[in-house]
Image (tube, rainbow, N blue to C red):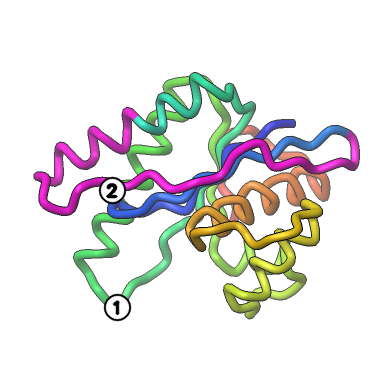
Amino acid sequence: MFVLGIDPGLSRCGYGLVRRDGRRLRAEAAGVIRTDPASPLANRLADLQREVRDLIIQYRPDEVAVERVLFSANVSTAMQTGQSSGVVMAEAAAAGCGVTLYSPNEVKSAVAGWGGADKGQVSRMVEVLLGLDVPLKPVDAADAVAVALCHLAMMTASPRSATGVAS
């Protein structure tokens, strides 16, 4: 199975592509899609959509896993993150990919073993699970890879509908 993990954001949207062959996990690509904060919102969302479409066309993942936005102290940031997440989900669905959402606690639990893990612990477990010698940078890329790893772990634990939504 080949999964595109997304840590949504408008200024920085992390992505990570992880392939599972049997028990072997391999990171195929990871990075961050950036949009220009000086551009109008609609243009930034269109830029994000285009970049996600290009990733899907280039790598052809089977499924897309997206970290769900639960809350934010800054309402504007939460709205932009939600809009970004919607663009990613719509583009993935239009491309025929299954789409699943995971809460931050589900991602942390699946990757680091408990939902209260901090970013450093999650990043370290991403390194361990993928056999990496150095941490993925920036942190948004590592977070996106963790989302992909979470999806692979959840699919192994209990297969579900390709368009399911994690609780």
- Tell me: 6 left or right of 49: right
Check residue 83 in the rendering and tell me which mark sits there, or answer none: 2
- What residue lies at 50% left-to-right and 26% top-to-bottom? 56
Looking at the picture, which amino acid does disc 1 mark?
Ala
In percent of width and height, residue 121 lies at 67, 75
Q: Where does the image place residue 66, in percent across and percent down from the top left?
A: 51, 48
Q: Earlier in the sequence, mark 2 or mark 1?
A: 1
Mark 1 lies on a secondary structure that is loop
Residue at x 58%, y 38% (from the top left corner): 4
Taking the image as shown, residue 88 lies to the left or right of residue 2, namely: left
- Crowdedness near tag 2: few (<14), some (14–19) or many (≥20) residues, C-alpha within 10 Å: some
Q: Residues within 10 Å of mark 1 (few under 14, many from 20)?
A: few
Q: Secondary structure at mark 2?
A: helix
Corner quadrant of residue 19: top right
Quadrant of the rendered image containing residue 39: top left
Quick check: can you spot residue 49? yes
Left or right: 73 in relation to 102? left
- Residue drawn at x 89%, y 35% is 22
Q: Is residue 110 above or below residue 61?
A: below
Position of 17 with respect to 110 (left or right) is left
Considering the image in quadrants, where does the C terminus appear? Answer: bottom right
Q: Is residue 164 visible?
A: no
What x and y, as percent, mark residue 61? Answer: 61, 27
Q: Which residue is mark 1?
A: 73
Q: Which residues are magenta?
A: 22-50
Against 48, is 107 above or below? below
| The N terminus, quarter of image | top right
Three-letter residue code for mark 2: Gln
Image height of 51 relative to 150, above or below:
above
Q: Was residue 120 drawn as part of the magenta stretch in this picture? A: no
